Structures are given as C-alpha cells and as structure tokens.
C-alpha cells in the first residue's frame, strides 16, 4: 500500500498544482455548462428546462472525467518520463502495478472531485435529475466505466508522447473533438447518422448516454440494448487494457 | 567482499556492441570511478548494474545476487534531475521514502533528518522549482542516503553544476556515506575521478586500464604538462608548439594548448622564445601534473572531454 498511496498523493498534489489541468478539468466544463444554461437552453420551454440543465450537467461531468483521464494522466506520465523518474524508479524495489494504480486513482479522484463541483454548479443553475437509488448506482457504474476508458486513452497518449505539451494538447484535442462529434456537447438528435453510430460505440459518449437515460430520460436511442451495453463495456475495458499494456511496455520495461 | 561483480558482459543494440565482454569487480566500501568519453559504454554498464537495462549476455551480481533481487541495496542518481519541481523538498523525499517501503512514521523522521544532513532543512517546504541546480542535486542525493542502501551508483551526477557546486556535492557524499558504502561513479571529468580510490578507464565498451588515480597517471609515462595561452590559435602556432611536444598530437584546450614534456624548467623559456620570435604573444604559461584526462589521452589517443563534447554536439 505504501507505494500505491505514495504515488496517489504525489500525483494528486501535482495535478492540483497544474493550472492547465485545473482549467481543462474544472473551468472549461463549468464555462460550457454556463453557456448551455444561459445561451443554448434559453428557448427550451420551462417545464423541460430543469431536466435539460440536468442533462447538460451530466454531459459536463462526463467531459470533466474524460479530460481528466485523457489530459492530466498523460501530462503526468510524460512529465515523469521526460524527467527520468522511471529510470530512478526502475532501480528501486517498486512494483510497477502499484505505481500505475496509484497514478490512475489519483487522476480519477481529481476527475471525480471536479465532477462534484460541476454537479453543484448544475444544481445551483436549476438542473434536476430523476433519481432512484438503483439508477444512481447503475449510473455510477457507467461513470466508472467511462473513467476507465478515458484513463486507457490517457495511458496510451502518455506512453507514446514524451513531450508534456504534446501530450496535453493531444489529450485535449481528442477529448474536445470526440465530445463535439459524439453528442456530449450537443444533443444526440442533432448529430448526422454516421456520428450517431460513432456516439453509440465511443465508450465515453455511450456511458454518457446510459447515465442520461437513467437519470433524465429518453436521449433519442436506446443505449441499454444488450448489444449497446456489451459494446460500451467491452470497448471501455479494451481501451483500458491497451493503455495499461502500452504503459508497462514503454515506461517500465527494461531495455 | 565483492559488492559488484561483472563477468563477460556483452550488450548489443541491434548489431552494435556497446559492451564488449567486460569484467569488473568492485569491493565493498570501494569508491570506484568509471571514466571515459560518452559512447564508451559506461552509462550502459551502470544501467545494467542498476537493473534499468538488461545485458545481451554475461553475469552481474550485487553482493552475490542478481541486480533485480538487490534493488533495495542500490541508490541510483541519473544525469537528469528526477525530483518533482511542483512538490516541496519534503514532499519529494516522502515520496521516495515510501516508494522504498518505509512506513509513514519512519518516513517523516528519516526525511527530516536527511534534509538536515544535507543542509536543506530550512528550505524543506519550498517547491523544488524554486531551488538552484546545486540545491536540487543535494535533494536528489538524499534519496540514496536512506539507511538500507549499501551501493551508490552516480551517473554523471554533477552534470550542469559549476566546479564549486561539484566539489560541494562530492564533499557531501564523502561526509555522509558509511565506510562500508560502495560508490560507483560514472564521469568524464578527471577532477571528479580523482576522488575515487580506484578508477577504470573505459573506451569502446571495454575497461582499458584500472588502478588508483596515481597508478594510472604514473603508468601513463607522462611527467609534465605545460599549459600555454597564446594571443592567437592557428596552424602556424600549432606547428611551433608541436616541436616541443612529446606526444604525437598537440592537445588543444579552450584557452590554448597542452604540451606534454619530460622536463619543464628549460623547455618553458624555449617555448616562449619560439612563439615570440614568430610575432605572437604568450599570455600565460605554466606546468602542471598530468591529470587522469591526460592519462586517458596517452592510453587511447582520444581526448575524453573533446570526444564527449563532439558526441553531445552531434546529438543536439
């Protein structure tokens, strides 16, 4: 536990002291949420407005988790690689899996903490959810799945891109572009057919759709069919597995 | 007792042999310096001993065990700064102590004690990004001073430090290490290697000579080195000075030239006369004892620093 908690604390402190991470994981989703409420949802009839705001809040929570996994995690890995920390750690009696788990948990904790801030902002702006205990638990399960998928993508970026700024911009780019084209920033119904297909298989937007389905209602397609659920779970786990394998190979393997 | 034993070590990158059937024994408590230009294989050798890299073939033992089984005994300092600039000195040290397996309670006591030892206790809550290069190196030095560590492997640890900070760094090591601690220093700087009890001169993946610094210098057959600083540096002046040189090639330094001579009291006035009669000015001239870098030059015909600088320049 020592190595896991040491890594967890180090990465968490590092991330909270990183202004770029604070902007992309907390400020950006909060700004987008404000834009949604005060600009995009102004025409929504009052009886639907509260749930529409709730839906935007969920989407921004998903985005925050996504950008945390895809940006903060690779930034941290790239920084450690560039600094030669892995060289040092390889000479110490460190278990790579504990270091990796500590790192992933820290970034996820950061993502969840920022998600909590976004939920509070959403509620203060009048967002409402149809919450039942069982749906809330299922939603948290899918949020965790989306988190794993994002962390997987983050591990891939961090393992392949050594330059810190390069890793951050790649992560931000993937998170923003995929959110824009997969229905996280916009309504699923506004997407062209081909992007609707992409939205159903891109694990982060699929998880977002499932959560909205549980906590808000219909989102334009049924994300809970056996096939959709299978794809969401399988692709999320695949992303995470690929990320862990690449991280082990590129950051920890002895040459 | 043998702290480090290396037998028939070969390391190849693709088809290029970086270590060529190398043998090395370092006894417990010895301060051993591997000296040679970049590309001679010394960092690869230390990386294999520190279990960062794997050998192509051959055997490495640390106190009789494989390197992977001896990680808790090794304290490694690489060339680059590895401490986290966003964390404070104390936070960095807590991290490394806990990664080494120390409990939370022990970590706090040991970390504070170590920071006192290296003179960084007052700056313990300062972010490392605010540290000077020398302070950061001192902090990183503390990561190998934890009680269980028995072997220090220092890979060019003073890269980027000025001579005063370098001396300070090695002074601390000398002061803080136990008598039984074994030190393996990798360097291309002769004055750093002078600190070692034994030096191995490395070239093209092999240790070409080994001994105490004095043994190596005496064994090189060099008696005196004359440093000369002249008003200009050109081919004509090189030809004049080469007439006094006992080696095949005249060594060029930043300031001027190095002339290897058996005797200096008569030669120096002659050199001055020869230079000035050709219309040039001698700005400074004096004789010094040969250094380990001179011994390396004598043995290999290569200049340690120049070879290193050329390689670094090519990399850039």
Image (cartoon, rainbow, N blue to C red):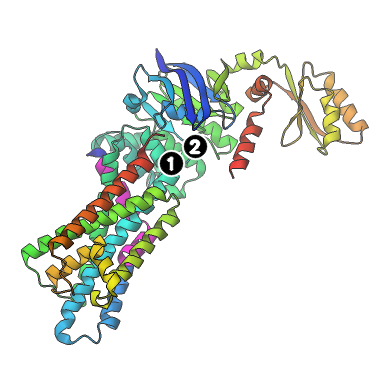
Q: Secondary structure at mark 1?
A: loop
Is B222 in the magenta? no
Q: Is residue B136 above or below residue A188?
A: above
Answer whether residue A158 is visible to the viewer in this image: yes
Q: Are marks 1 and 2 on the same chain?
A: no
The region drawn magenta spans: A4-27
**Which residue does the numbered mark 1 point to in the structure image?**
A84
Q: Main secondary structure of the magenta part?
A: helix
State which quadrant residue B296 falls in.
top right
Label of residue B272 in the image: none
Q: Position of residue B181 (x, y in %)?
A: 41, 21
- Whether pointer 1 and pointer 2 mark residues with C-beta atoms closer than 8 Å, the reply is yes
- Quarter holding the N terminus of chain A? top left
Q: Chain of mark 1?
A: A
Q: Position of residue A6 (x, y in %)?
A: 28, 42
**Which residue does the numbered mark 2 point to in the structure image?**
B79
Q: Is residue B39 above or below residue A46?
A: above
State which quadrant residue A211 falls in.
bottom left
Q: Is residue A247 above or below residue B186?
A: below
- Quarter holding the C terminus of chain A? top left
Q: Chain of mark 2?
A: B
- As measured in the structure, the alpha-carbon distance from the residue carrying label 1 to the one carrying label 2 is 9 Å
Q: Nearer the viewer, residue B227 or B184?
A: B184
Q: Locate residue A140 relative to residue A177 in the image: left or right.
A: left
Q: Secondary structure at mark 2?
A: loop
Answer whether residue B126 is visible to the viewer in this image: no
Residue at x 49%, y 17% (from the top left corner): B23
Q: Locate residue B224 relative to residue A43 in the image: left or right.
A: right
């Amino acid at each position: 536990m020592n190595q896991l908690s040491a890594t967890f604390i180090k990465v968490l402190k590092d991330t909270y002291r990183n202004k770029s991470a604070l902007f992309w994981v907390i400020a950006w989703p909060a700004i987008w949420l404000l834009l949604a409420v005060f600009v995009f949802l102004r025409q929504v009839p009052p009886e639907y407005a509260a749930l529409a705001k709730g839906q935007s809040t969920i989407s921004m929570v998903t985005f925050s988790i996504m950008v945390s996994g895809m940006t903060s995690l690779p930034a941290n890995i790239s920084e450690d690689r560039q600094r030669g920390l892995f060289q040092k750690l390889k000479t110490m009696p460190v278990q790579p899996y504990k270091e990796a788990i500590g790192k992933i948990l820290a970034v996820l904790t950061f993502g969840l903490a920022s998600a909590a801030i976004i939920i509070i902002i959403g509620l203060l702006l009048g967002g409402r959810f149809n919450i039942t205990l069982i749906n809330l638990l299922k939603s948290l399960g899918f949020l965790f799945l989306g988190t794993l998928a994002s962390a997987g993508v983050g591990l891939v970026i961090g393992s392949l891109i050594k330059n810190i700024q390069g890793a951050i911009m790649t992560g931000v780019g993937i998170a923003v572009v995929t959110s824009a084209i997969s229905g996280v920033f916009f309504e699923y119904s506004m997407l062209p057919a081909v992007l609707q297909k992409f939205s159903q298989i891109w694990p982060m937007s699929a998880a977002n759709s499932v959560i909205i389905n549980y906590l808000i209602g219909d989102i334009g397609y049924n994300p809970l069919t056996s096939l959709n659920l299978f794809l969401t779970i399988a692709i999320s786990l695949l992303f995470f597995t690929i990320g862990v394998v690449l991280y082990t190979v590129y950051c920890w393997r002895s040459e | 007792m043998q702290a480090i034993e290396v037998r028939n070590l070969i390391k190849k990158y693709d088809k290029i042999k970086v270590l060529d059937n190398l043998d090395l024994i370092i006894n417990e408590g010895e301060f051993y310096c591997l000296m040679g230009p970049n590309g001679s294989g010394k960092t690869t050798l230390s990386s294999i001993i520190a279990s960062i890299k794997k050998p192509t073939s051959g055997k490495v033992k640390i106190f009789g065990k494989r390197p992977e089984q001896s990680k808790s005994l090794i304290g490694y300092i690489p060339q680059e700064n590895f401490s986290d600039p966003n964390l404070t000195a104390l936070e960095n040290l807590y991290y490394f102590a806990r990664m080494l397996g120390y409990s939370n309670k022990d970590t706090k006591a040991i970390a504070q004690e170590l920071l006192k030892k290296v003179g960084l206790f007052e700056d313990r809550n300062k972010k490392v990004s605010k540290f000077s290069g020398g302070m950061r190196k001192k902090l990183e030095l503390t990561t190998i001073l934890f009680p269980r560590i028995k072997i220090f492997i220092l890979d060019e640890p003073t890269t980027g430090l000025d001579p005063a900070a370098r001396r300070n760094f090695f002074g601390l090591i000398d002061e803080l290490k136990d008598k039984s601690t074994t030190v393996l220093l990798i360097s291309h700087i002769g004055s750093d290697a002078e600190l070692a009890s034994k030096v191995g001169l490395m070239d093209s993946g092999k240790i070409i000579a080994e001994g105490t610094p004095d043994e190596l210098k005496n064994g090189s057959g060099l008696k005196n080195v004359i440093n000369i600083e002249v008003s200009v540096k050109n081919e004509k002046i090189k030809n004049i000075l080469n007439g006094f040189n006992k080696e095949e090639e005249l060594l060029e330094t930043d300031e001027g030239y190095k002339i290897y001579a058996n005797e200096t009291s008569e030669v120096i006035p002659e050199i001055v006369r020869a230079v000035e009669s050709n219309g040039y000015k001698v700005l400074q001239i004096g004789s010094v004892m040969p250094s380990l870098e001179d011994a390396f030059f004598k043995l290999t015909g290569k200049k340690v620093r120049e070879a290193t600088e050329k390689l670094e320049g090519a990399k850039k």
